[in-house]
Image (cartoon, grey):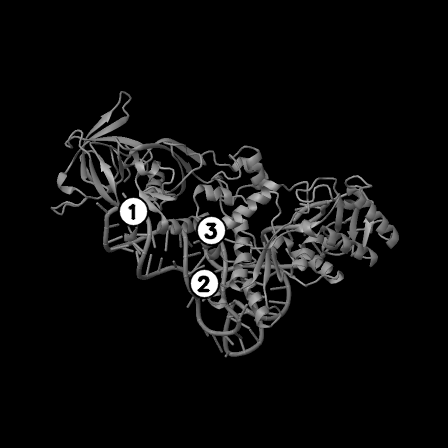
Amino acid sequence: MTAAEAISETGRDFIRDIIAADIASGRHRKIITRFPPEPNGYLHIGHAKSICLNFGIAQEFGGQCNLRFDDTNPTKEEQEYIDAIMADVHWLGFDWGEHLYYASDYFEQLYAWAEHLIRDGLAYVDDQSQDEMRANRGTLTAPGRNSPFRDRSVEENLDLFRRMRAGEFPSGARVLRARIDMASGNINMRDPVLYRILHASHPRTGAAWCIYPSYDFAHGQSDAIEGVTHSICTLEFEDHRPLYDWFLEHLPVPSRPHQYEFARLNLSYTVLSKRVLTELVRGGYVKGWDDPRMPTLAGLRRRGVPPEALREFVRRIGVAKANSVVDVAMFEHAIREVLNAAAMRRMAVLRPLRVVIENYPEGQIEELEAVNHPDDPDAGTRRVRFGRELYIERDDFMENPPKKFFRLSPGKEVRLRYAYFITCREVVKDAAGEVVALRCTYDPATRGGNAPDGRKVQGTIHWVSAADAVTAEVRLYNQLFTKPDPDVGNFAADINPNSLEVVIDAKLEPALAADNSLSPVQFERLGYFARDKDSAPGRPVFNRTVGLRDTWGKVQGAAAVRKPDEDGDIK
RNA sequence: UGGGGCGUAGCCAAGUGGUAAGGCAGCGGAUUUUGAUUCCGCCAUUCGGAGGUUCGAAUCCUCCCGCCCCAGCCA
């Protein structure tokens, strides 16, 4: 596949256009991008957009994408996150090859460049307190005031900076600042901090340093060291670009990268703020970074979302500069699309209702053929056991059904998928009036699901043989938040109390009990499910990745809102 | 009366002076042993608004309106 073909498949966007133009003009021969996570949390679906963009561009243009950890703040970063991030990028389907880097690899060079700026009179050590600095920074509309330490001599600055490095001062005592313009309309240019004193152990450099470069002082130079040609980041860094360029212009860097910004992903009913995600985990709102309700790659993976679905979703939402909120339905569509094609079908009953086939011989068992995938004959068939006692879904029976209810009700005939037509003859209730079982009859002539007399039936329902069924725990997930646009300032108020429903006695086809059973799999008529790591021998646990499209449920819901009748009938 | 961005359908998003792609959602209909899938059809006389330039404007110019980001020794 040529680069041009690859792009037409991926779609165009303004960044790919710029890169294509840079190649066409001869400005670059080899494209180098980078994905630069800070290891202070887990990757989420928003990062997936960035990963697909950066690694995707490298693939399409025959270039290279580096994985570079932006580890300049040891007070927030941990090895656990570094490991998880690498695993997640690989799982998503991308590989950085030999190009694994850390900003901390460049600490010595960055330090040398800081001294270079000092020598050129472009940086100074500031003794002001944090409060003083803030007070002198000015406001959005008023210029700042120069620090009283701004005009120290080169010698004094050098001496102080070296002593900062040597550990002579406590954390926060002094900073190194660029000497730019305290009156700039762009606050990032008002003498930004280059180095701060942090007596903290770093996951990689340990105690080697007690001063650490700021993001601004590290990022562009790291790009330059690695020969990154296109440094792609999100919109909020747009007004850092003049500073990014300033460092590259004033330092003897080995290459001249350029920064481009795109709009980060926002998803309805979802929060992608790292701060909030961290609080969800630490506050116990979810069971961990890989809780299937989390939008983290680890959570999505555990939920059963295939990486192809993430990539397809990202491809479809495009890349632009307008802030936007993508409907989570678009993500679910991508998941269903991939899973519909890939997942084998099995039968499982979530809320079992016992059915006794009165005219089926006691003790008789037979095996019926069921296809594994309706659109893929190569997926083959399997045998499912049928007996006198079965489980069907409680939702597939209604004693007083509304019009257009195609499932089972007293006196009505339906097809048991791959098996027989059955007719409901009697409803068995307990003392409380609860339906506890159904007595039905079957038509032996309809074996396999077709009536020789051409008789039609309106509905087909799934079932599991009671004698063979395996009991399982099934976890049904709903949106973590109740509102399309949760309040990140008070996220707890918008958390969905019903984001997790646990079904403890689902009945599965026996093959689903095996440790190596299919996953993800479609439970027919219900949705796509993935085996969870909490599964124990003989006690499988499944997560619902996403339900099937449910037009009947939608019609029902709408009708119920419109006109809930006394007897439950819906006109 | 600061600086930087962005405004095309309910939601994403193409379009770069020649007469509004595509996807999601929605709505009809066909097929169906998953009310799934698949398939067909419908869904912006109009591009935040108003002027202007032009034979012709979502695209160029002017003014206005709206939304987002920035005052961490976070990234």
Give the camera-side residue of A462 and A236: A462
Report the amino acid beneath label 1: Asn
Q: Position of residue A338 (x, y in %)?
A: 39, 51
Q: Nearer the viewer, mark 2 or mark 1?
A: 1
Q: Is residue A426 left or right of residue B58?
A: left
Q: Spatial distance from mark 3 to mark 1, Cα to Cα?
A: 25 Å
Q: What residue is shown at x 75% (from left), y 48% (from top)?
A: A195
- Graded by Cα atoms within 10 Å as few (under 14), some (14 to 19) or many (20 or more), the crowding at tag 3 reads many
Q: Spatial distance from mark 2 to mark 1, Cα to Cα?
A: 31 Å
Report the amino acid beneath label 3: Leu
Chain of the residue under label 2: A
Instruction: Identify the image quadrant of the N terminus of chain A.
Output: bottom left
Q: What residue is shown at x 27% (from left), y 52% (from top)?
A: A377
Chain of the residue under label 1: A
From this viewpoint, which residue is outermost toward the top?
A431
Q: Give the structural element (helix, strand or loop) at label 3.
A: helix
Instruction: Identify the image quadrant of the C terminus of chain A.
Output: top left
Q: Give the structural element (helix, strand or loop) at label 2.
A: helix
- Graded by Cα atoms within 10 Å as few (under 14), some (14 to 19) or many (20 or more), the crowding at tag 1 reads some
- The residue under label 2 is A9
Q: Position of residue B66 (x, y in %)?
A: 58, 53
Same chain for the residues at labels 3 and 1, yes or no? Answer: yes
Label at residue A372: 1
Label at residue A321: none
Chain of the residue under label 3: A
- Graded by Cα atoms within 10 Å as few (under 14), some (14 to 19) or many (20 or more), the crowding at tag 2 reads few
Report the amino acid beneath label 2: Glu
Same chain for the residues at labels 2 and 3, yes or no? Answer: yes
Q: Is residue A304 left or right of residue A46?
A: left
- The residue under label 3 is A310
